[in-house]
């Protein structure tokens, strides 16, 4: 089973709202993630993408990328969202598609903070749509379950 | 039927994710709104409130309060979210509960902008939980369907 399929199944099984959104990870590496969901399950009163669905799919994209990075770097931690800011630029009129990248420098800094202090922060930018129609800037915080040696 | 029940039904019928979240408006006036949803439908992988559900419920609270104000002031407009910023302070361990207020000055300015320019902005702060566990600051934009005379 690919990492994308395994993490999709883990998220769908643990977060009921992700199942309602029909969340799916389309591709996943330590460098980037692509996530999608059909428009029908995520429409608003205007028949375009619901602001809450757009945010939720974007925040799950960042969360999933962080989780994959943590797995690859053997970081035993709980991951939470600290704060996030979203800007809606245009209506989403097709399937919701999110994209997020993390550079080698970002991953290294995240790991180093975590090793030094038992807590690491990763600030990510997630785009929704090709224009993009929305941009989410979110800070994820990994908190050690057992203090690393 | 009360305004709270009518608007809850309108939102549940138009936004599938609100139904998945079991969204409900508990009280509604031009001054304030209270919205809730059960924890079970909105849990994350830690068994506490999912960041996406917390955001979505808060943004719907603001959207619903704006919509009610627009109805009461006979503003014929489409309402969208422009930008929003959320801060998560503590895990949500019980039913999700949102609260939002709009002052008479805010409502008057919103209406005046709308009358003058065919577009009005309302910046609201929505709290989630009693601590509060999260705070959303969101800007809603009402865009005239037909230019008011």
Image (cartoon, coloured by chain):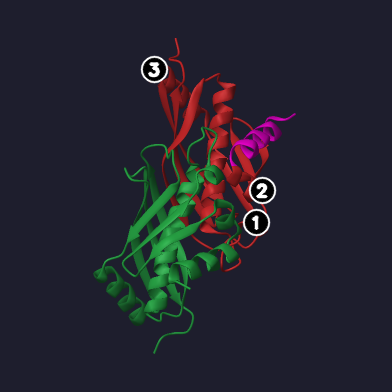
Chain colours: A red, B green
Queried whether the magenta region covers residue B58, the answer comes back as no
Residue A145: x and y, percent?
A: 46, 20
Up/down of B61 relative to A25, above or below: below
Q: CA distance from mark 1 to mark 3?
A: 43 Å
Q: Are the residues tagged 1 and 3 within 8 Å (C-beta)?
A: no
Question: Which residue sits furthest right?
Answer: A1
Q: Nearer the viewer, mark 3 or mark 2?
A: 2
Frontmost residue, B122 versus B103 = B103
Q: Are marks 2 and 1 on the same chain?
A: yes
Q: Which residue is mark 1?
A: A41
Mark 2: give few (<14), some (14-19) or many (20+) Cα within 10 Å: some
Label 3: chain?
Answer: A
Q: Which residue is mark 2?
A: A22
Write the residue at 35% across / 58% down: B100
Q: Which residue is mark 3?
A: A116
Mark 3: give few (<14), some (14-19) or many (20+) Cα within 10 Å: few
Predominant SS along the magenta part: helix
SS at circle 1: helix
Q: Nearer the viewer, mark 1 or mark 3?
A: 1
Frontmost residue, A51 versus A138 = A51
Question: Which residue sits furthest top?
Answer: A149
Q: CA distance from mark 3 to mark 2?
A: 38 Å
The stretch of residues the image draws in magenta is A1-15
Q: Are the residues tagged 2 and 1 within 8 Å (C-beta)?
A: yes
Write the residue at 46% across / 16% down: A146
Q: CA distance from mark 2 to mark 1?
A: 7 Å
N-term mark: 1 or 3 = 1
């Amino acid at each position: 089973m690919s990492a994308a399929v395994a993490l999709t199944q883990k998220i769908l099984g643990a977060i009921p709202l992700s199942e309602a959104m029909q969340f799916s990870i389309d591709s996943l590496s330590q460098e980037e993630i692509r996530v999608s969901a059909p428009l029908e399950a995520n429409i608003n009163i205007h028949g375009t993408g619901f602001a809450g669905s757009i945010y939720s799919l974007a925040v799950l994209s960042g969360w999933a990328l962080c989780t994959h990075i943590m797995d690859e770097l053997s970081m035993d931690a709980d991951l939470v969202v600290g704060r996030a800011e979203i800007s809606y630029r245009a209506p989403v009129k097709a399937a919701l598609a999110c994209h997020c990248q993390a550079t080698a420098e970002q991953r290294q800094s995240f790991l180093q903070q975590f090793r030094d202090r038992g807590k690491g922060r990763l600030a990510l930018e997630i785009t929704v749509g090709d224009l993009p129609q929305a941009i989410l800037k979110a800070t994820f915080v990994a908190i050690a379950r057992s203090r690393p040696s």
